Image (cartoon, helix red, strand yellow):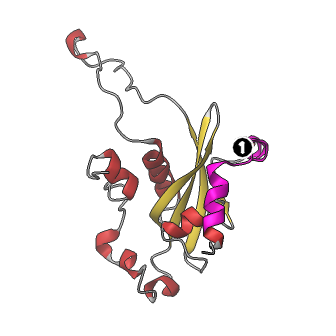
Amino acid sequence: MTKGMYHYIKQAWKKPDAETLRQRMVEWRKGEVFTRVEKPLRLDRARALGYKDKKGFVVVRVRLKRGGHKRQRPVKARRSKRMHTRKNLQMNYKGIAEQRVARKFQNLEVLNSYNVGKDGMNYFFEVILVDPERPEIKNDKTINWISSQKHRSRVMRGLTSTAKKSRGLRHN
């Protein structure tokens, strides 16, 4: 049986070329935190998550610092008994990346995201955004649901795939 192009892209990402990826990440570290990219780096993953190469779809690469999920100790305004913290942040890095991108690009809606790499200091994600006001999106039957009012700011309400996972709503 013959395999398609997306199959081979997926296989290549299972064992990526370490040197090429390392060089890319060095450039990404020097660049901006939010970088709009022309084409997704992992085309197979982006297509599986709903990306289409048409007007209204935007892909943004975001850089996140690793670590620091422990809650900060309050500085003041509590008695000593209430000053300690025992809980850690429950959100995953991908959800944090999606929320930061949604705050930066307020006219776009977050569709989904995927991991493109990590190094000793940073995580790198590509977030797929959709412009719900574009006529190309409103006329597309597979994605026009995102144009309705009830899907506005879905990432902030914890309705993306990764947010549902971190909230314990997925059973896989």
Residue at the extreme bottom of the image, as rendered: 139
Q: Is residue 152 left or right of residue 81?
A: right
- Mark 1 burial class by Cα count in 10 Å: few <14, some 14-19, many 20+: many
x and y, in percent, of residue 50 in the image: 48, 71
> On screen, 26 above or below 153?
above
Q: Which residues are magenta?
A: 7-27
Residue at image position (35%, 62%) is: 154
**Of helix, strand and loop, which mostly describes the magenta segment?**
helix
Q: Amino acid at mark 1?
A: Met
Q: Give the secondary structure at mark 1.
A: helix
Q: Is residue 10 magenta?
A: yes
x and y, in percent, of residue 99 in the image: 44, 51
x and y, in percent, of residue 170 in the image: 29, 53
x and y, in percent, of residue 44 in the image: 59, 65
For this rendering, which residue is in front, 64 or 120?
Answer: 120
> On screen, 50 above or below 55?
above
- The answer, for residue 129, to whether it is visible in the render is yes
For this rendering, which residue is in front, 51 or 2?
Answer: 2
> On screen, 90 above or below 150?
above
